[in-house]
Every structure is written in C-alpha cells, then in structure tokens.
C-alpha cells in the first residue's frame, strides 16, 4: 500500500452508516449521562432563544427542525426576514445547485403571532448550517455553536443511540472539520474500540497498560510517543486524535487494525504478548508511512492542529 487512496480503500470497506452504528458503544456513555429527561414527542413545538431572538422549533423524525425565516431574522437583522429569505433563495438558485438543499427544507406546522398553526419552512441542523454560510453576519459563528447545542438538546441516546455519534459529528462540523476528516475520525473511533476490546479479551489491564501499548504502536507508526505527538501539535489537555490530520488518522487506524489482526493470528495473551503484536502492528503502519513519504516527499507527522484562533502550522519539512 503506497498511496493515500489505497490506504483509505483498505480501511473503508464498511459503509459509513454502518460505521456510525458501530461507533455508538464508544461515544454513547459520556453523552447519555447528560440527558436524564424525557425526550420530546413528534410534533412538539417550543421556542428557543438566540441573543434575544425567538426561533421556533418543532420535533420531527426524531430531530429538531427550526423555522428558517426566524433564523434569517436573527442573523440578517432585517425587518422583512421573509423577503430576505425569498431573495436569498433566488440568489442561491442562480449561483449554486440549490436543488439538493431545497429538497431538505420542509413545511411544518408552527404557531404564528396570532397563536394559530401555519405551515412554515423548516430545516434540521445540518441544512441550517449550509444556509447560514450564505448569510453575511457577525453572528454566524456564534449561531453555529448555539445550533450545535440546541439541535440535539433533550434527545436521549438510549432512545436513539446514534444521536451521540451524530452530535459529535455535528460539533466537529461546526468547528470547521471537513466531511472527509469527520468520516476518518468516526472510523478511527471504531477501530480504537475494536483494539481495546481485543486487549480486554487478551488479559491487558485497562489504564496504564492500554497507554503503554498505545505508545508502542505510536512509536512504531510515527517515530514518536503519543505525548511527544501532542507536544509537537502544541496540545495540552486536548484529545490528540481530534487534532490529527487525515493522514495521521489513517496511519493510526492502520497501526491499530494491524495490531488486532496480528494479536488474533498469533493468539497472544497478557501484556508481553500484546506488546509484540503492537510492535508488529505499528511497524506495518510505519513501513507504509515511510513509503508514502518517499513517494510524496512530504512528512506525514504534522504540527497542524484545530485549536481555536490558532493558525494551522506548516507540516514538518
């Protein structure tokens, strides 16, 4: 495997929707603890507030839909939000493919100023994020963060476990990650969960021993331990994998996936046996990394991070 495309192909055989479902066990617990109230019912309507502006939302198909015109009013600060939205739709139709976006905007019943229910154009969180990008407003970035929070508020993961994964994906999207990076990150969660489950079955103790073996794989894959990798990126308490580049995630997955395969093939047990498997698995990824670096003349290990208000640093020369 000498190219990034070949590496991604080897690690992407499982359809992404299946990957999302398999990521549930790793992400569900931390999110589940935050939701201890009954979830809303289909058709439930409530008023959310963003910087003093009321935004109507209705629960539909197990997620919140928001009034598009209310969002426009909050961001564009116009006295005629309906006309602004109408003009914006016309502009979008002329400048880009609006068909896919418009298909995701539905008509849902919401209360008007007179208290009666009217059909109102509404969109879910992901669709609204795309609309907001077309509205020039200093409130756009704060609104994206607000939307990521309220969009999944009070939806319990034990009713729909995939919500925890979708919530994490949305947060990464709001933070500016690409769809490709998000897919790689979710896949890396699944691979990591498979690895730690394998370690548990083979007598490795959670905690210090997991950390030790992770360092073994990292050293063989990248030439640095995880703490050194974090220091390179200028990270402190942040999760290293949330700040890896696409290629770093891919080689991390390759090292961990190879470790699982070798552990199963050799039936190793305990820390020492799994250390041998981790060394071999990391070496597989390290050899592939070096071959790619030779063909591209670029280092895979990167100083880049996703810290807020931090310019992305150049890759190592």
Image (cartoon, grey):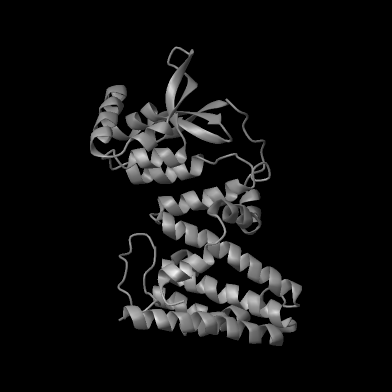
Hey, which quadrant is residue 133 in on the image? top left
Q: Where is residue 196 in the image (x, y as percent from the top left)?
A: 66, 70
Residue occupying the point 64% across, 53% down: 28
Q: Where is residue 297 in the image (x, y as percent from the top left)?
A: 31, 81
Residue occupying the point 30% across, 65% down: 311
Does residue 64 sit above or below 180 in this rendering?
Answer: above
Residue occupying the point 41% across, 82% down: 291
Residue 207 visible in the picture: yes
Front residue of this view, candidates 289 and 215: 289
Residue 77 visible in the picture: no
Hey, which quadrant is residue 159 in on the image? top right
Q: Position of residue 125 (x, y in %)?
A: 46, 39
* Left or right of residue 165: residue 113: left
Hey, which quadrant is residue 179 in on the image? bottom left
Residue occupying the point 27% across, 31% down: 88
Does residue 59 sit above or below 311 in this rendering?
Answer: above
Q: Quadrant of the C terminus?
A: bottom left
Q: Position of residue 157 (x, y in %)?
A: 64, 45
- Count the marks: 0
């Amino acid at each position: 495997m000498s190219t990034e495309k070949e590496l991604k192909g080897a690690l992407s055989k499982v359809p992404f929707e299946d990957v999302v479902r398999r990521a549930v066990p790793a992400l569900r617990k931390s999110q589940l603890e935050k939701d201890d109230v009954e979830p809303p019912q289909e058709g439930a309507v409530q008023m959310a507030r963003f910087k003093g502006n009321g935004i109507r939302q209705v629960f539909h198909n197990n997620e919140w839909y928001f009034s598009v015109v209310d969002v426009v009013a909050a961001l564009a600060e116009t006295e005629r939000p309906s006309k602004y939205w109408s003009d914006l739709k016309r502009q979008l139709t002329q400048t880009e493919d609006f068909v896919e976006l418009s298909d995701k905007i539905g008509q849902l019943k919401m209360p008007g100023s007179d208290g009666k229910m009217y059909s109102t154009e509404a969109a879910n969180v992901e669709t609204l994020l795309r609309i907001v990008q077309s509205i020039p407003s200093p409130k756009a970035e704060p609104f994206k963060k607000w939307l990521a929070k309220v969009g999944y508020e009070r939806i319990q993961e034990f009713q729909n476990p995939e919500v925890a994964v979708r919530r994490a994906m949305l947060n990464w999207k709001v933070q500016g990650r690409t769809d490709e990076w998000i897919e790689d990150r979710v896949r890396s969660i699944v691979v990591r969960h498979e690895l730690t489950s394998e370690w548990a079955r083979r007598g490795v103790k959670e905690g210090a021993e997991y950390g030790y073996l992770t360092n073994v794989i990292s050293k063989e894959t990248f030439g640095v331990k995880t703490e050194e990798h974090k220091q390179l990126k200028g990270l402190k308490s942040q999760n290293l994998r949330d700040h890896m580049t696409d290629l770093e995630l891919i080689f991390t997955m390759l090292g961990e996936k190879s470790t699982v395969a070798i552990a199963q093939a050799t039936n190793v047990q305990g820390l020492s046996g799994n250390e041998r498997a981790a060394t071999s698995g990391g070496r597989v990824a390290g050899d592939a990394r070096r071959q790619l670096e030779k063909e591209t003349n670029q280092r895979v290990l990167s100083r880049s991070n996703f810290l807020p208000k931090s310019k992305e640093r150049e890759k190592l020369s």
